[in-house]
Image (cartoon, rainbow, N blue to C red):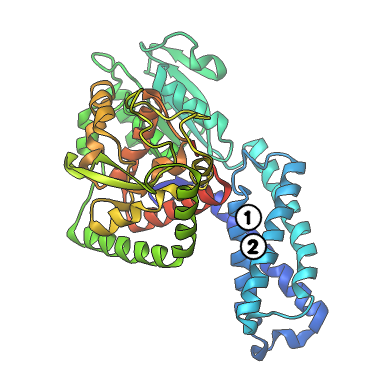
Amino acid sequence: MLRLFKQYYPVRNAIFVVGEALFIFLSVLIASFLMIGSESFSTDHGLIPKTLLICAVCQLCLYYNDLYDMNVADSFHELFTRLLQALGASAIFLAGVYFLFPICVIGRGIFSISICFVIAFIVLWRLAYTHILNRGLFNKKIILLGNGELSKNIASQIEENKDCGYQVSAVIEGKDAGDGNVAQSFQSICRNGYDELCESARKLNIDKIVVALEERRGCFPVKPLLRCRVNGFEVIEGTSFYEMLTGKLIVEKINPSWLIFSEGFTKSWLKKLFKRSSDIVFSLILLIVLAPLLTAVAILIKLDSKGPIIFSQERVGENKKPYVIYKFRSMMDNAEDQCGPVWAKCDDPRITRVGKFIRKWRIDEFPQLFNVIKGEMSFVGPRPEREFFVEELEETIPYYGERFSVKPGVTGWAQVSYPYGASVEDAKEKLNYDLFYIKNMSTFMDMMVVMRTVKTVLFGEGAR
């Protein structure tokens, strides 16, 4: 498994992405040879850097068209449609680059011909990869210890995400077995007994033993697990494996000792300084670049409905310190005078016509960049919440108060990983992602969040 941006990915995923890049690279080389001949490979032509530019743009467009999500592009029709959309977007983007920087032009007609090879190579490559996924080739085999809710969550995640790189070979039932046994879907080795665990793992060629026992008092299989460990089998705690598998925690299943002794939660002064510096620089650049758009939005808000252009409201920040957040007003003025604080809803009648548009494309969030410059927020972090809801959620959701150990963010891991939430259950699920971010926050993870935020904004996903 490869660890990238604090998440684990199967090695075959990296091979798949690199292999696709090589096929795009090869397609451009073939097209260059057909159009120009061997002269295209001379150093004067600059073929290599120009080809690398095409590869980078094409793969970026493939990513933004969800072509690296195997649960989305799971049929030939969907694959072919999204592939054409991605390559069309690549052509438009490269046309703009070539217009601004003519030196980057690779040669007349080369890109058009290379597209034909790219489509053929990528379709064949992905059909082969899909065959590997469907057959479960190169999957790591695991044994699940336990038959409770945590075990069912792990099995469900593996079953739903065929590209996760794991396969549940067997389940050993513990005393936490309940309704809807997860073991019914897999080969069950034994019931309420672990004596033959090591022999069973060897017989099934197991790579990892996941301990997902929820009731451990008086029934934790210390000796069998110790024997497995010294015999070379990897043993991992269930909640840690779930974190590694999904990119989130599961607050209802973790205990304080797990959080205390787990890796992460590092907050060095150097990391804080770099994050603060990048927040200021990035926010200033965005405000300057987007100034015409923000001015136009302000005018439209004023023309569309009565009330102020900027909506301000008190939110709870780092260390529970209150601050005033700024957003473009997207609702009618004084929208909560009669109903009081409530969760936002789909097709909320309080939202104005312009408000629907700016919410869909997340434009209403941009004034928060001033909060970032003031130091009250970070560009990436947990979503800021109101004190009214914080008090309710702290009483209902375990560890909810821990999200205030960092500054709230304009965007965040929870915002790009989970749809807009409007209930306590949604807040609980978002906390799973927020705690994962706080535990594993880094510059590279912030970059990943920003990339996924751009995708969310471009396609207007998750707005309400």
Residue indicated by mark 1: 62
At a point 56% along the width and 18% down the height, the residue shown is 185
Q: Quadrant of residue 270?
A: bottom left
Q: Horizontal and vertical percent for residue 225?
A: 33, 27
At a point 34% along the width and 58% down the height, the residue shown is 443
Q: Secondary structure at mark 1?
A: helix
Label 1 amino acid? Leu
Task: Return the mark for residue 408.
Answer: none
Label 2 amino acid? Cys
Q: Quadrant of residue 112?
A: bottom right
Position above or below: 208 against 98: above
Q: Horizontal and vertical percent for residue 391?
A: 23, 26
Question: In the shown orientation, is residue 154 left or right of residue 438?
Answer: right
Question: In the shown orientation, is residue 265 left or right of residue 457?
Answer: left
Q: Nearer the viewer, residue 227 or 126?
A: 126
Q: Nearer the viewer, residue 258 or 322?
A: 322
Tell me whether the residue at label 2 lies in contact with that at label 1, contact meaning CB atoms closer than 8 angstroms: yes
Residue indicated by mark 2: 58
